Amino acid sequence: DNVAKKRKMYEDFLTQISILKDMDPYERSKVADSLKTKTFSDQEVIIKEGEPGDTFYIIIDGNALAIKDETVIKTYGKGDYFGELALLKNQPRAATVKAKDTCQVVYLDRKSFKRLLGPIEEILHRNVENYRKVLKQLGLDTACIEGN
Ligand code: CMP
């Protein structure tokens, strides 16, 4: 059936995502079941800085850029994730993320993110330190990631 097909399609892919690799396989299959997919065209805005956010994304094909104050702060490719910060910290989006060429993503809404990625929340939180370093290095304001 459809559920089995989808699970099979995403299960292997999810083992290649660095933050999801250490997850229990059963938990990972639950993530696979909940993913939805969407395609963005070149230059299309996926996330807009300053807006409220309810979605967590993983790229399955193509590339994207994170931009803050007109500066590129990160480039993304297949297997990379973004949009976790607004969900972890209940804050507005810290940066804009834009598709670079056609970009296909899978995504989770806030509820699924909290329920399914709870076990790796700590790992996601730890990565925020890297964001801070990047912003400081580029001379950008770190206020967007300070709260809790
Ligand atoms: P969020 O704030 O939800 O939306 C914008 C996303 O950009 C953010 O989550 C992170 O996933 C991503 N991002 C990439 N680099 C940085 C950075 N240096 N600081 C903050 N967010 C970043």
Image: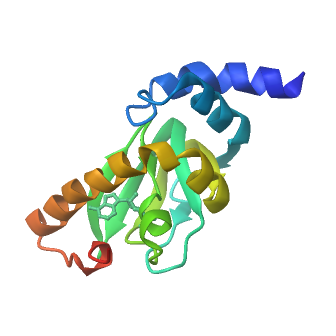
In the rendering, at what x and y percent does residue 49 appear?
44, 75
Q: Residue at x 45, y 24 (%)?
A: 16
Residue 37 seen in the current view: yes
Q: In the displayed structure, does residue 102 sit left or right of residue 22?
A: right
Q: Where is residue 129 in the image (x, y as percent from the top left)?
A: 20, 58
The structure's colour scheme is rainbow
How many numbered dots are placed on residues in this image? 0
Left or right, 63 with respect to 45, comes to left
Q: Which residue is drawn at 52% across and 27% down?
A: 24
Name above or below for residue 105 compared with residue 128: above
Residue 15 location, x and y as percent?
49, 23
Q: Taking the image as drawn, is residue 101 in sight?
A: no
Q: Where is residue 125? Give x, y as percent.
A: 33, 56
As drawn, is 144 to the left or to the right of 54?
Answer: left
Q: Is residue 96 above or below residue 37?
A: below
Q: In this view, does 89 lie above or below 8?
A: below
For residue 56, side relative to residue 36 (left or right):
left
View extreme (right): residue: 1
* Nearer to the camera, 22 or 57: 22
Q: Quadrant of ligand 1?
A: bottom left
Determine which quarter of the picture holds residue 52.
Answer: bottom right
- At 47% from the left and 43% from the top, the residue drawn is 119
Name above or below for residue 41 compared with residue 71.
above
Instruction: Identify the residue at horizontal 31%, vertical 71% (top origin).
Output: 68
Image quarter hosting the C terminus: bottom left
Quadrant of image for the N terminus: top right
